[in-house]
């Protein structure tokens, strides 16, 4: 359950779960009387699941309303109608249903009734582990019978759900895989879920029906990043200079038109990434897609690789250093947290090389720079980036990464820092070493599918002397699987117009 961006009034309501409340005057300051009345079900009813629980709440500036069965909260609402679906209770017998409200003035009120829960008939238990504005993470007890074949998860937007409704997840042959991450839901909406287990003999077993209400969309976090605006333009993408040479994946050079955007001046730092961690970034599904969340859960990922390991300059003690050791999934989760995204390859290359210089390949557009700072790696006999300096007369002064923006003479023509060196950077696109042959002109965003995500910019473990800075060129490109984590891979973000 998301634990950030909770209104202050909700905290008041949650306190009531501990101390209890009633409709009697609670001694709060004078104001419109706050009152709660449960209208459905009636006191003494025998209920069947899923059960709608409704309440009338009167008063001004209602901050939040909580629905409680026994000691378990099954819904928290911040706006009317105050109606929620109670989908399951583990024990049969008498259960106290309570609805509590709080207003912005600090007044609290509750109403409670007693209902009878009959013994439940289902084969295994389905429950909600986490929910956000657009997804839910479900879990269920493992099927204990023989001849297991598959699980199927069905979803409905009605008050009940069965196998005639929408199939949203299918897990074949893996009886221990008892989780599903359902994405693409609408904010503040009600859904019903059920899981069926099928055997190779044709038998079918069913879970309880589970009601889920998605949350509201939280505001983006402000990470204080400096963004550099870059106007849209047409430029040459790929290796286009007559001298030297690029890798096969850098050909053919081709003109590309991109719209304007803003890009982070610096790579995302450890201090910025820690804000994501402290806000529950690794436990809140709000920021993750299905593949990333399931990868994280399967591998127990709770922080970047080697976080707080001083050997790699990653962690709380290195606030101004670029965060490394993050997968593409983690980079995208952070991007969603701040309401931005990773740059496309085209955006990244344009911000790095620009459009200065001559038109060597005759396509009508200047070539830009081979390196962010110019056409020579050691231009002017100076070090322009953080790299592995073994075997060179030029020492960058760092064994691993360096604070962002250390090499001011390494800025691109737009003023973007560390586009080469320090940590390499994830891009948004799937990687394909033959993609340039498609000659996509207008805002290319890479192939539709793939197995690797693109990485740009040389890093601190690549040697600068090899092929005269070959890996630090603005056109150099490679790819890695999105789950890859290396201490020398980080990211920066863009904001599209």
Image (cartoon, grey):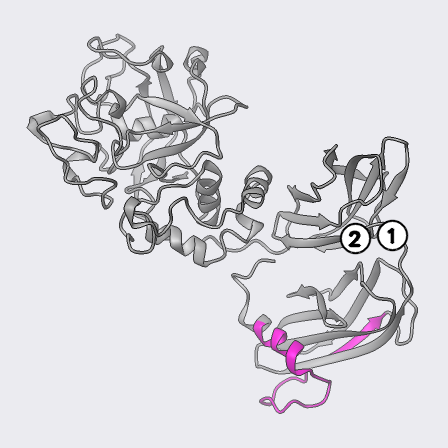
Image quadrant holding the C terminus, namely: top left
Answer few, some or many: residues within 10 Å of disc 2's Cα (few below 14, many 20 plus, some between 14 and 19).
Answer: some
SS at circle 1: loop
Q: Which of 275 and 461 is in front in this view?
A: 461
Q: Which residue lies furthest to the front in this view?
A: 146
- Relative side of 121 to 169, left or right: right
Read off the residue under disc 1: 122
Is 99 placed above or below 405 here?
below
Q: Residue 37: x and y, percent?
A: 78, 77
Q: Quadrant of residue 435?
A: top left
Residue 381 percent coordinates (x, y) = 7, 27
**Foreground of the two, 173 or 418:** 173
**Residue plotted at (33% across, 36% down):** 488
The reply to whether the magenta stretch includes residue 349 is no
Q: Which residue corresponds to the image point at 33% horizontal and 12% vertical from the top-left?
A: 253
Q: Where is residue 286 in the image (x, y as percent from the top left)?
A: 56, 50
- The picture places residue 183, in percent across and down from the top left corner, at 64, 42
Distance in Å between CA atoms under marks 2 and 1: 8 Å
Q: Residues within 10 Å of mark 1 (few under 14, many from 20)?
A: few
Q: Is 118 positioned to the left or the right of 15 in the image?
A: right
Magenta region: 11-40
Q: Which residue is drawn at 21% across and 25% down?
A: 371
Establish if 214 lies above or below 41: above
In the picture, measured across the screen, residue 249 lies left or right of residue 168, that is left
Quarter of the view holding residue 441: top left
Q: Answer whether residue 321 is visible to the viewer in this image.
A: yes
Mark 2 lies on residue: 125
Q: Quadrant of the N terminus?
A: bottom right
């Amino acid at each position: 359950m998301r634990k950030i961006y909770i209104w202050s009034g909700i905290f008041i309501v949650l306190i009531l779960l501990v101390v209890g409340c009633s409709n009697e005057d609670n001694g709060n300051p004078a104001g419109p009387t706050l009152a709660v009345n449960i209208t459905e079900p009636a006191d003494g009813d025998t209920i069947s699941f899923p059960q709608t629980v409704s309440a009338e709440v009167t008063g001004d500036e209602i901050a939040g309303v909580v629905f409680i069965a026994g000691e378990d909260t099954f819904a928290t609402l911040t706006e009317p109608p105050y109606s929620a679906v109670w989908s399951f209770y583990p024990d049969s017998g008498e259960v106290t249903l309570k609805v509590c409200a709080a207003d912005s003035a600090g007044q609290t009120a509750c109403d409670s009734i007693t209902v009878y829960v009959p013994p439940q008939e289902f084969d295994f238990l389905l429950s909600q582990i986490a929910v956000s504005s657009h997804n839910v993470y479900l879990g269920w007890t493992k099927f204990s019978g023989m001849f297991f074949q598959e699980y199927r998860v069905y979803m409905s937007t009605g008050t009940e759900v069965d196998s005639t409704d929408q199939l949203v997840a299918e897990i074949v042959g893996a009886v221990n895989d008892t989780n599903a991450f359902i994405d693409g839901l609408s904010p503040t909406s009600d859904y019903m879920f059920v899981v069926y287990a099928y055997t190779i003999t044709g038998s079918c077993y069913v879970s309880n029906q589970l009601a889920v209400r998605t949350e509201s969309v939280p505001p983006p976090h402000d990470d204080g990043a400096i963004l550099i605006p870059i106007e849209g333009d047409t430029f040459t993408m790929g290796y286009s200079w007559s001298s030297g040479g690029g890798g096969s994946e850098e050909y053919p050079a081709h003109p590309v038109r991109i719209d304007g955007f803003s890009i982070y001046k610096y790579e995302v730092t450890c201090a910025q990434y820690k804000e994501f961690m402290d806000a529950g970034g690794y436990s809140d599904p709000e920021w993750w897609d299905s593949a990333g969340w399931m990868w994280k859960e399967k591998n127990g990922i709770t922080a970047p690789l080697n976080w707080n390991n001083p050997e790699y300059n990653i962690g709380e003690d290195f606030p101004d250093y670029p965060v490394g050791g993050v997968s593409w999934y983690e980079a995208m989760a952070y991007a969603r947290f701040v309401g931005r995204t990773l740059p496309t390859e085209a955006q990244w290359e344009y911000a790095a090389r620009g459009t200065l210089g001559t038109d060597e390949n005759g396509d009508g557009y200047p070539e830009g720079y081979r390196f962010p700072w110019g056409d020579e790696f050691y231009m002017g006999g100076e070090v322009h980036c953080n790299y592995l300096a073994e075997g060179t007369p030029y020492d960058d002064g760092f064994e691993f990464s360096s604070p962002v923006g250390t090499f001011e003479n390494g800025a691109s023509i737009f003023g973007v820092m560390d586009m080469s060196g320090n940590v390499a950077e994830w891009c948004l696109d799937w990687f394909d070493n033959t993609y340039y042959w498609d000659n996509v002109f207008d805002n290319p965003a890479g192939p539709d599918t793939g197995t690797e995500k693109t990485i740009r910019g040389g890093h601190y473990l690549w040697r600068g002397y090899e092929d005269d800075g070959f890996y630090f060129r603005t056109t150099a490109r490679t790819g890695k699987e999105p789950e890859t984590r290396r201490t020398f891979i980080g990211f920066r973000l863009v904001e599209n117009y």
